[in-house]
Image (spheres, rainbow, N blue to C red):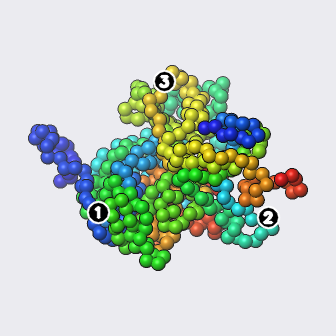
């Protein structure tokens, strides 16, 4: 499987780290909403078909990517930077560029 | 007299083998049942069998989308063991082990259960200590476990590279002698036949396309062979749990579906007479009665419903095999295939009532569902019949994740691809 990193171009899947369901919404760090935290940590959308997921190009530019991939065919229909997307599972440094 | 016996074999041989009955009927589904079990794999069939045998509930249908046993019960590497660390898992899998030990007699069907042992290897002193801890935990609950030294391991598996110059030298291992392998298809067929003979309808080529509801309550299913009503609807669909729960309107589950590959080599003379697991990666191997080496490793690592894997894992599994057995370098791989595993967030299963009224859920088997087949069906049947879990499956609830009661044997956290 090849993932086309928007920065590096098409690369082997071995260069990437899978971070799973990209629809999860991380609560604000100070949030005390237990249901929201539980949902973020444990609940997953698990569709048979197009799956919106986060990958990190850990063996390359280290960008976090938002990938739409079909879980029945493994076909990838879009790859974009996850950066700047507040729903992303990617962590941002406080005050860092986003 | 048992239907299958030395006597019946002889009798049918003399009469040209014309009088054997099919192992199960091919009934059309009725309009309603007491219980519908969705999923004609090992767990669904054993659930139906124990519903009929233990609880006298015989007005049961097992609905299977494809043909019987076409999913993971025919796709695993057939290992049966109960060498877990945490008490909830140990008790449950040990119950399964005890059912395995009598299964061929119980079913009057030879499942070829072979207690050849399962040996986990340690490659560092720290890992060996960890195995000792697990072995003690097992023995504490009455499960057999013994530590083995490198010299003992070398005698047991002469082909193994136990030298100090191995890539990951072996410092010892933990052996469960009662562990073993079974003929996986025979398990499905034996349970199917046992359930069928007790009146259960096994309906193949019958895909569930939706749920019938009365308010919140599940009252049946719509299928490709028409609507079927039932007082109780039980799901045992493993890797398809996400898809089937979506039909019931539940999108989010503590489950991810991943593909796991398995491999068989060409037939060799006997070389490994136990199950062996590698400790510095994820690799397990045994040898079938036909002589093929049966082995596998890690998940491919990303969500998938495709029953096939990709090449990086093939490469990884082969290199792990050669790290243990350099002498197998020229053995050819015969076949490989993939199965879809329902990976839970803590690596342990879910056997519970609900989450909707009238529904019962059995899922989250990760890649360890085969060894659980008897106990899974036994506990699930109990839960369906009595509307409450047995002690063995009481910890395996769906809401344990949200109540701080996870059963994480590996201590991995909510990263399903790592369990």
Asked if residue B334 can be seen in this view, the reply is yes
Which chain does the numbered disc 3 sit on?
A: B
Extreme residue toward the left, this view: B15
For the residues carrying marks 1 and 3, which lies nearer the camera in this image? 1
Residue at image position (67%, 66%) is A38
Q: Which secondary structure, mark 2?
A: loop
Dot 3 falls on a residue whose secondary structure is: loop
- Extreme residue in the bottom direction: B215
Mark 1 to mark 3: distance in Å? 48 Å
Q: Residue at x 26, y 60 (%)?
A: B28
Q: Chain of mark 2?
A: A
The image shows residue B209 at horizontal and vertical percentages of 42, 61
Q: Measure the C-alpha gap from mark 1 to mark 2.
A: 53 Å
Taking the image as shown, residue B92 lies to the left or right of residue A29, namely left
Q: Give above or below for B90 relative to A28.
A: above
Position of residue B106 in the picture relative to residue B399 (left or right): left
Residue B31 in percent (x, y) is at: 29, 69
Q: Nearer the viewer, residue A26 or B144?
A: A26
Task: Mark 2 vs mark 3: give the one in front.
Answer: 2
Of all residues, the one furthest to the right in this rendering is: A95
Q: Measured along the vertical axis of the image, is residue B399 above or below residue B315?
A: below
Q: Which residue is mark 1?
A: B29
State which chain disc 1 sits on.
Answer: B
The reply to whether residue B45 is visible in this rendering is no
Q: Is residue A44 above or below residue B339?
A: below
Give the mark nearer the N terminus: 1 vs 3: 1
In the rendered structure, find residue B331 and report the number of the disc placed on it: 3
Residue at x 58%, y 68% (from the top left corner)? B399
- Residue depicted at x 76% and y 71%: A32
Residue under disc 1 on the same chain as residue under disc 2: no
């Amino acid at each position: 499987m090849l993932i086309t990193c928007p920065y590096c171009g098409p690369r082997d899947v071995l260069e990437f780290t899978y971070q799973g369901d990209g629809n999860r919404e991380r609560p604000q760090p100070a949030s005390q909403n237990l249901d929201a935290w539980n949902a973020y940590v444990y609940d997953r959308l698990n569709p048979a078909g197009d799956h919106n997921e986060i990958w990190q190009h850990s063996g390359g530019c280290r960008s976090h990517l938002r990938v739409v991939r079909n879980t029945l065919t493994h076909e990838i229909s879009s790859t974009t930077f996850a950066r700047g997307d507040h729903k992303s599972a990617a962590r941002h440094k406080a005050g860092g560029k986003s | 007299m048992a239907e299958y016996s030395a006597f019946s074999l002889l009798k049918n041989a003399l009469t040209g083998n014309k009088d054997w009955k099919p192992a199960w009927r091919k009934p059309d589904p009725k309009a309603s049942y007491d219980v519908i079990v969705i999923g004609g794999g090992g767990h669904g069939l054993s659930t139906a069998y124990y519903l009929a045998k233990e609880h006298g509930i015989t007005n049961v249908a097992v609905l299977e989308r494809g043909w019987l046993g076409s999913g993971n019960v025919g796709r695993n590497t057939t290992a049966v063991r109960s060498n877990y660390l945490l008490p909830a898992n140990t008790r449950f899998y040990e119950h399964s082990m005890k059912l395995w030990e009598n299964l061929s007699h119980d079913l009057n069907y030879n499942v070829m259960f072979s207690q050849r042992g399962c040996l986990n290897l340690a490659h560092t002193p720290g890992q060996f200590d960890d195995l000792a801890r697990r072995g003690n935990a097992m023995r504490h609950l009455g499960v057999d476990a013994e530590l083995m030294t490198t010299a003992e391991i070398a005698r047991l598996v002469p082909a193994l590279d136990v030298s100090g110059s191995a890539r990951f030298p072996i410092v010892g291992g933990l052996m469960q002698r009662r562990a073993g392998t079974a003929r996986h298809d025979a398990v499905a067929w034996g349970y199917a036949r046992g359930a069928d003979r007790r009146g259960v309808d096994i309906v193949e080529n019958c895909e569930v396309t939706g749920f019938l509801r009365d308010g919140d309550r599940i009252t049946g299913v719509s299928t490709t062979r028409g609507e079927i009503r039932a007082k109780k609807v039980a799901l045992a669909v493993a890797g398809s749990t996400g898809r089937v729960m979506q039909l019931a309107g539940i999108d989010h589950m503590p489950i991810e579906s991943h593909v796991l590959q398995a491999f068989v080599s060409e037939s060799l003379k006997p070389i490994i007479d136990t199950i062996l697991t590698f400790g510095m990666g994820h690799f397990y191997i045994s040898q079938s009665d036909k002589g093929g080496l049966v082995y596998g490793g890690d998940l491919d690592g990303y969500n998938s419903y495709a029953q096939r894997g990709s090449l990086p894992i093939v490469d990884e599994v082969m290199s792990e095999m050669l790290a243990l057995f350099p002498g197998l370098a020229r053995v050819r791989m015969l076949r490989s295939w993939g199965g879809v595993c329902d990976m839970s967030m803590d690596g342990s299963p879910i056997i519970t009532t609900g989450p909707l009224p009238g529904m019962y859920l059995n899922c989250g088997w990760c890649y360890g569902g085969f060894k659980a087949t008897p106990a899974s069906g036994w506990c699930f049947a109990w839960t369906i019949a009595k509307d409450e879990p047995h002690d063995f499956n009481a910890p395996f609830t769906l809401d344990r994740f949200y109540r701080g009661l996870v059963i994480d044997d590996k201590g991995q956290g909510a990263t399903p691809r790592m369990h």
